[in-house]
Image (cartoon, rainbow, N blue to C red):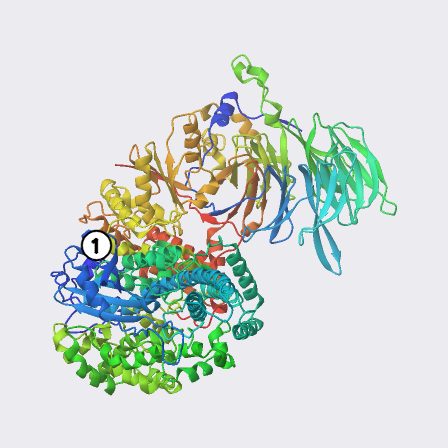
């Protein structure tokens, strides 16, 4: 495990202060049609895909809305929660060979609800919980689902409490992941607690292990692949765990630099705030882990256990959600209200990687100060690639909380400005409209004669 | 969009008639026919008129002073100038052919109300240079002689063609007005009768009391003269009561009476209301003394029974309405009966009621409004109306693209077919369904039998009675239908032929012609295309109307003969034989069938002979007729023949109706480009609640003297405003070298923000540029003229053109922030610094519209220029949107790239457009597609392109 300290102070500042902007010329940005979805009255925080065509949104106004991705229509409005919604998940059960997806929502009013997104009915409700639920985890294999808050509860598919586990942490469980062999990892403060769920009835939950290797609060916890899960902490530690024996496979501490070192010259900056290196969000596609660290982006390869690409200041403020669109494309949204699309690009001339020009490539128009970059850092990470901004989606006037991709159908973003925006490909939409047009013409009156 | 009328007026048709040589030429139904009177001097005809513009004159034949003018519309002495209204009133009142029968018909003890149909006459006074459409009508007045007051409304114009060519529409509009007046008059009359009856009842009761006293006072068996006098007086009063009651029953029978005037279809709601009211009155007064008079009671019972019958057969709402009405009668401020002297109700020394008193105030006002609208509608030169109609006809064919740049047609569509539909002036129009056909009426001396044969209207007490024994109980009433006025309608036809002073010489010729060529040609568009006017109703029109249509028919028949049967004249009526059949055959059959159906077909032919015989200038079809009518039309050249488009019956069928001047607009929209399944049609007609007069703006701003801006409903951009905007746009184009880019932004769907600190300037700029906003919405809702708060992304959806206030900080910085934040979606025109920030435009398409050095000087000309260019764009976009292979793969193996390439090829090679010009078309076609698809609840979407912008400076 090495400490990865990047760059000199000046270079950092240069990057930090640079207003990263791609300009208006974005030839590869295909999100050329947008639709503003109105319906919420407060911050929209959660987006969940229901099926190929529908998604649900929820937020601080306690509303759960179901939308059609193709038309942008609001299909249903599900009211029931009196306070903000804290977690939302889909629950799919198979009845008569047809899967039926429902929505489970948890709210600050200490209730849990099950919704039918076809009818908008509130199928089940559990209220008067001891605490509000912060995260939900559905174990489809076991037909149960878990809710994590101050206590960890296991519910069956019919909303019956199977067992529950009290814990004594103040913050409660902030994240849950499913592990092999009926195990569950729950993030609590600085620890990750592994529980085992007995398969035979009645279900019981037993704490197996407590991993306390993080220095600070664990912010995110994700499963990477069958054998791995990853966690990120508030101070920028990224730990890769073995999913079956819960050993640390890799430890990466993303820390920009010791600010105290040259505090005498840069006192006004002070030390980097913890949030600047807090791992806000982790995503993975099994081989790559994308970490949102403060306002920066890091792509970590599980195979080589190294950072393969990074961008120190990818956004103007904290990144809230990220996604790997493909092996080389990724997307991030941030409190600055923008969504950015990045592409990992190989360096055109790896041999010159040590030259100052290297940094000049990824910081726009800021080549003048790059010369001071210590070249040793570069040589330490020879495989590094660049994260190239290929487009940005600007529309929200508040922080973009989350986005949801429907691949070629488009992307939905939700924001603190109470809006959601559906970003689509205008060409595709135009094609679809034409299809519909000619379908309608065919179905039209026989007098159509043009 | 089709062109400036003043250009049209001066165009000359080509002599060599090679119109069809060009294979690429538009099919006729899309072509704009040239103004047919191109050769006539448009300024000559009003030279000797003593008035400056058309007006409507309302006159009455006063029984005290004779014909007198009552009012003119517009009510402006300048309009009439030195024109002698008194003399002209005399003229127009002297051609009253209503043939009202007055007095006691033989065999009836009571005075009869004569129910007369309106008559319509066109009258010319060449000395005065005045021509008039004269519409006579009769109102009822209890104090007038024979209870009737003859009135007439005349549309006076210096241009006889204008009247003749628009005879149908004038007829419709004036019929509406007349119907409105008469409805109000009947109500007022019934009220008057009611009052009178109350008086009489009161008087009778007083007299009875006095008589009783006297009788008691006098010794028994001896009748003093006083007693005898009183008894006589009492008898007189009672007789008078009967008379008035009878009048009441007569007037109440009026609404249900079969009408022979196809235009006089009253508003059904008014009708039922009136009916209810009348019945309330009838019952009330019939029951006052039925205890005293058994015979009377019998009668009342009969009447009630009949009413009951009628009611029984009807829906319950009728009853409710009646109850309401009865309540209304009860609620009315109680009238204090006055003692009246036993005297005949006819008074000659009294002041006659004014027109307002004769009709209900509301009805009177409504009528005046209608007439004002009519005046506005018909004002201006004929050629404006002609081009306006063409414009409308063309636009009606482009319903799919109209929303892009055309003024909302909804209103004018309403204006057109409003006339063909019973419209109640009291705004009952909204909930009145258009009756599928006017009540069939047959003009025949044996009207009584025919009445019984007719399909009965449920709400028609008269016809219900006609079936039953009620006719025996009330012989007078059924006599009403066959009252001598019917006969006079027939017998007076010969006199009616004196259509105009200087025309009578032509009559014999025309009569022969028309007899010879009766029903050979379906020239009359309303006969063919108006679903309401089925052929058999043709016979039922009163002679004037009939003569117009028949006249057209006959002349068109001649055309056919002259042209060898395969050529039809280019005219307002256009090709009227699109069915691939020889012109007239199919139609002739149809009409022939209609003629056989009608029992009065022989009569019709006689009528054909006896008519105004002014076919030559009734319709354009008669132009070719000029030789046979040398005195009038010798100067006009025969119009070149046009090919008959035979393969597109759908497209060209309605065209006739659309193009024909003076035809009632067929309700069926032009099917030619009518791709609309269902809901699409609605917006067009929905938007049309505006007043019927406001589409006069064409003629108004195109040179007529009439000023006064039309009312603007809810921010609807009227044409006038758009013309004003034309001036502004011209100014903008001349002033700003980057106008081209600004226009391109608007046309390619990029929101343009006009930023400025001075509200007036920004608003002016916005209203000028609003011309170029595609699909601005019926109320211009895609344009925001003045915005003082920062806009959001949703606003960019809503508005395509925004006037934004530049305010000093700190709010201003917030605004500028939103400007820069959304800079990729917008173009910013800075009105203060005169800069434009937008993507570069290098196309050529807009160059001729935004020519910095344009030599156009007049705003209206520029407006029309822009409109025609935009119209061209819209039709190209239509083509793009509805061409299948430009959007969808033709074969299974074709990918989207091939389609894309084909579309690009289409834009570049076939339309010759560069990529940026192509963007305009793509955007327009996208709008068309969206409009056509009418997405329901889905929020709107907008496109953007990620291209960088440049800053243009002046």
Q: What is the count of numbered marks?
A: 1
Q: Residue at x 46, y 73 (%)?
A: A446
Image position, residue B846 (x, y; %)? 28, 51
Element type at mark 1: loop
> A365 or B174, which lies in front?
B174
Image position, residue B742 (x, y; %)? 32, 44
Q: Is residue B237 left or right of residue B585?
A: right
> B503 or A426, which lies in front?
B503
The C terminus of chain B is located in which quarter?
top left
> B449 or B168, which lies in front?
B449
Residue A388 visible here: yes
For disc 1, the marked residue is B704
Q: Residue at x 72, y 36 (%)?
A: A109
Q: Is residue A178 left or right of residue A375?
A: right
Mark 1 Cα shell of 10 Å, populated few (<14), some (14-19), many (≥20): some
Residue A438 visible here: no
Q: Residue at x 80, y 44 (%)?
A: A155
- In the image, residue A121 sits, relative to residue B756, either above or below, namely below
Callout 1: chain: B
Quarter of the image for residue A176 reads top right
The N terminus of chain B is located in which quarter?
bottom left
């Amino acid at each position: 495990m090495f400490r990865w300290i990047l760059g000199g102070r000046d270079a950092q500042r240069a990057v930090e202060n640079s207003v990263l902007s791609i300009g208006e010329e974005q030839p590869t940005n295909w999100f050329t049609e947008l639709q503003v979805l109105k319906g919420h009255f407060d911050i929209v925080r959660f987006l969940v895909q229901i099926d190929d065509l529908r998604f649900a949104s929820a937020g601080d106004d306690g509303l759960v809305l179901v939308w059609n991705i193709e038309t942008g229509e609001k299909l249903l409005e599900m009211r029931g929660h009196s306070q903000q919604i804290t977690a939302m998940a889909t629950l799919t059960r198979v009845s008569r060979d047809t899967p039926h997806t429902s929505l489970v929502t948890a709210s600050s009013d200490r209730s849990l609800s099950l919704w039918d997104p076809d009818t908008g009915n509130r199928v089940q409700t559990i209220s008067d919980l001891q605490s509000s639920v912060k995260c939900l985890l559905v174990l489809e294999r076991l037909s149960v689902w878990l809710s994590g808050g101050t206590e960890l509860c296991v519910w069956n598919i019919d909303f019956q409490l199977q067992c529950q586990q009290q814990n004594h942490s103040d913050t409660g469980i902030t994240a849950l992941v499913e592990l092999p062999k009926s195990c569950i990892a729950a993030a609590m403060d600085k620890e990750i607690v592994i529980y085992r769920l007995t398969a035979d009835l009645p279900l019981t939950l037993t704490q197996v292990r407590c991993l306390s290797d993080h220095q600070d609060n664990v912010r995110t916890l994700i499963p990477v692949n069958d054998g791995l899960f990853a966690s990120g902490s508030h101070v920028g530690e990224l730990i890769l765990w073995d999913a079956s024996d819960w050993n640390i496979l890799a430890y990466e501490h993303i820390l920009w630099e010791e600010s105290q070192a040259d505090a005498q010259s840069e006192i006004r900056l002070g030390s980097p705030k913890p949030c600047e290196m807090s791992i806000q969000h982790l995503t993975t596609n099994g081989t790559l882990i994308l970490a949102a660290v403060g306002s920066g982006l890091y792509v970590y390869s599980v195979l080589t256990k190294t950072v393969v690409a990074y961008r120190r200041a990818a956004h103007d403020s904290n990144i809230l959600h990220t996604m790997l669109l493909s092996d080389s494309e990724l997307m991030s949204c941030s409190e600055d209200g923008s969504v950015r699309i990045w592409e990992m690009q190989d360096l055109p001339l790896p041999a010159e990687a040590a030259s100052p020009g290297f940094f000049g490539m990824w910081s726009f128009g800021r080549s003048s100060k790059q010369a001071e970059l210590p070249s040793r850092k570069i040589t330490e990470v020879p495989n590094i690639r660049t994260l190239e901004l290929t487009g940005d989606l600007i529309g929200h006037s508040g922080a973009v909380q989350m986005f949801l991709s429907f691949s070629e159908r488009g992307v939905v973003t939700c924001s603190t400005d109470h809006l959601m925006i559906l970003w689509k490909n205008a060409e595709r939409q135009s094609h679809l409209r034409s299809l519909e047009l000619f379908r309608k013409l065919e179905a039209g009156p026989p007098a159509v004669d043009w | 969009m089709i062109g400036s009328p003043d250009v049209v007026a001066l165009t000359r048709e080509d002599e060599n008639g090679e119109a069809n040589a060009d294979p690429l030429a538009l099919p006729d139904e899309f072509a704009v026919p040239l103004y047919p009177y191109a050769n006539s001097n448009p300024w000559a005809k009003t030279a000797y008129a003593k008035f400056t513009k058309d007006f409507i004159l309302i006159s009455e034949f006063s029984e005290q002073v004779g014909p007198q003018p009552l009012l003119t519309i517009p009510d402006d002495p300048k309009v009439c100038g030195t024109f002698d209204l008194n003399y002209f009133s005399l003229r127009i009142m002297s051609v009253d052919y209503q043939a009202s029968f007055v007095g006691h018909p033989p065999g009836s003890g009571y005075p009869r109300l004569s129910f007369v149909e309106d008559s319509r006459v066109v009258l010319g006074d060449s000395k005065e240079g005045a021509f008039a459409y004269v519409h006579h009508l009769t109102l009822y007045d209890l104090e007038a002689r024979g209870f009737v007051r003859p009135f007439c409304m005349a549309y006076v114009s210096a241009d006889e063609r204008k009247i003749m060519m628009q005879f149908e529409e004038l007829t419709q509009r004036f019929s509406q007005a007349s119907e409105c007046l008469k409805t109000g008059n009947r109500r007022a009359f019934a009220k008057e009768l009611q009052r009178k009856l109350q008086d009489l009842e009161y008087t009778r009761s007083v007299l009875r009391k006095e008589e009783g006293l006297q009788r008691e006072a006098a010794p028994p068996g001896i009748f003093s003269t006083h007693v005898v006098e009183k008894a006589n007086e009492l008898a007189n009063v009672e007789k008078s009561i009967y008379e008035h009651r009878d009048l009441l029953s007569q007037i109440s029978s009026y609404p249900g009476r079969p009408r022979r005037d196809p235009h006089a279809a009253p508003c059904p709601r008014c009708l039922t209301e009136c009916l209810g009211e009348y019945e309330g009155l009838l019952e009330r007064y019939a029951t006052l003394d039925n205890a005293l008079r058994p015979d009377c009671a019998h009668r009342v019972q009969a009447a009630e029974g009949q009413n009951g019958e009628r009611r029984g057969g009807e829906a319950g709402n009728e009853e409710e309405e009646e109850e309401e009405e009865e309540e209304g009668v009860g609620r009315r401020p109680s009238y204090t009966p006055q003692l009246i002297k036993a005297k005949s109700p006819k008074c000659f020394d009294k002041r006659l009621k004014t027109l307002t008193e004769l009709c209900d105030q509301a009805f009177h006002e409504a009528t005046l409004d209608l007439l004002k609208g009519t005046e506005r509608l018909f004002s201006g030169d004929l050629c404006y109306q002609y081009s306006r109609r063409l414009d409308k006809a063309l636009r009606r064919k482009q319903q799919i693209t109209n929303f892009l740049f055309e003024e909302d047609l909804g209103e004018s569509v309403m204006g057109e077919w409003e006339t063909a539909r019973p419209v109640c002036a009291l705004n009952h129009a909204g909930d009145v369904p258009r009756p599928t056909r006017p009540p069939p009426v047959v003009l025949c001396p044996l009207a009584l039998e025919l009445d019984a044969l007719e399909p009965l209207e449920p709400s028609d007490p008269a016809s219900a009675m006609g079936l039953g024994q009620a006719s025996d109980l009330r012989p007078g009433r059924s006599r009403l239908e066959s009252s001598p006025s019917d006969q006079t309608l027939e017998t007076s036809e010969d006199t009616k032929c004196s259509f105009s002073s200087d025309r009578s010489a032509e009559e014999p010729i025309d009569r022969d012609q028309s007899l010879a060529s009766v029903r050979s040609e379906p020239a009359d568009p309303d006969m063919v295309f108006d679903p309401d006017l089925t052929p058999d109703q043709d016979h039922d029109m009163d002679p004037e109307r009939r003569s117009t249509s028949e006249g057209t028919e006959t002349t068109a028949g001649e055309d056919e003969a002259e042209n060898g049967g395969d050529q039809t004249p280019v005219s307002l009526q256009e090709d009227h034989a699109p069915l691939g059949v020889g012109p007239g055959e199919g139609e002739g059959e149809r009409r022939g069938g209609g003629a056989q159906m009608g029992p009065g077909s022989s009569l019709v032919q006689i009528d054909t002979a006896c008519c105004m015989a002014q076919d030559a200038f009734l319709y354009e079809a008669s132009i070719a007729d000029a030789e046979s009518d040398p005195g009038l039309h010798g100067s006009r050249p025969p119009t070149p023949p046009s090919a008959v488009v035979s393969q597109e019956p759908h497209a060209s069928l309605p065209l006739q109706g659309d193009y024909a001047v003076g035809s009632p607009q067929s309700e069926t929209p032009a099917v030619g480009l009518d791709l609309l399944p269902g809901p699409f049609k609605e917006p067009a007609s929905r938007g049309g609640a505006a007043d019927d007069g406001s589409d006069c703006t064409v003629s108004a701003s195109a040179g007529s003297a009439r000023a006064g801006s039309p009312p603007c409903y809810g921010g609807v951009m009227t044409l006038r405003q758009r013309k004003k905007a034309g001036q502004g746009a011209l100014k903008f184009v001349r002033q700003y070298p980057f106008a081209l880019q600004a226009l391109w932004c608007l046309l390619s769907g990029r929101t343009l923000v006009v930023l400025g600190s001075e509200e007036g300037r920004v608003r002016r700029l916005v209203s000028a540029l609003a011309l170029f906003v595609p699909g601005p919405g019926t109320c211009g809702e895609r344009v925001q003229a003045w915005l003082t708060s920062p806009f959001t992304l949703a606003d960019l959806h809503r508005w395509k053109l925004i006037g934004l206030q530049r305010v000093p900080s700190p709010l201003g910085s917030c605004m500028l922030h939103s400007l820069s934040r959304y800079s990729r979606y917008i173009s910013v025109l800075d009105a203060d610094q005169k800069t434009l920030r937008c993507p570069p435009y290098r196309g050529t398409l807009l160059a001729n519209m935004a020519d910095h050095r344009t030599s156009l000087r007049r705003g209206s000309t520029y407006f029309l220029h822009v409109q025609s260019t935009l119209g061209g764009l819209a039709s190209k976009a239509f083509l793009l949107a509805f061409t299948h292979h430009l959007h969808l793969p033709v074969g299974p193996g074709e990918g989207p790239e091939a389609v894309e390439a084909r579309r690009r090829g289409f834009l570049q090679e076939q339309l010759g457009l560069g990529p940026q010009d192509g963007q305009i078309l793509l955007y327009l076609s996208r709008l068309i597609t969206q409009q056509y698809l009418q997405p329901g609840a889905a929020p709107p979407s907008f496109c953007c392109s990620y291209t960088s912008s440049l800053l243009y400076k002046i």
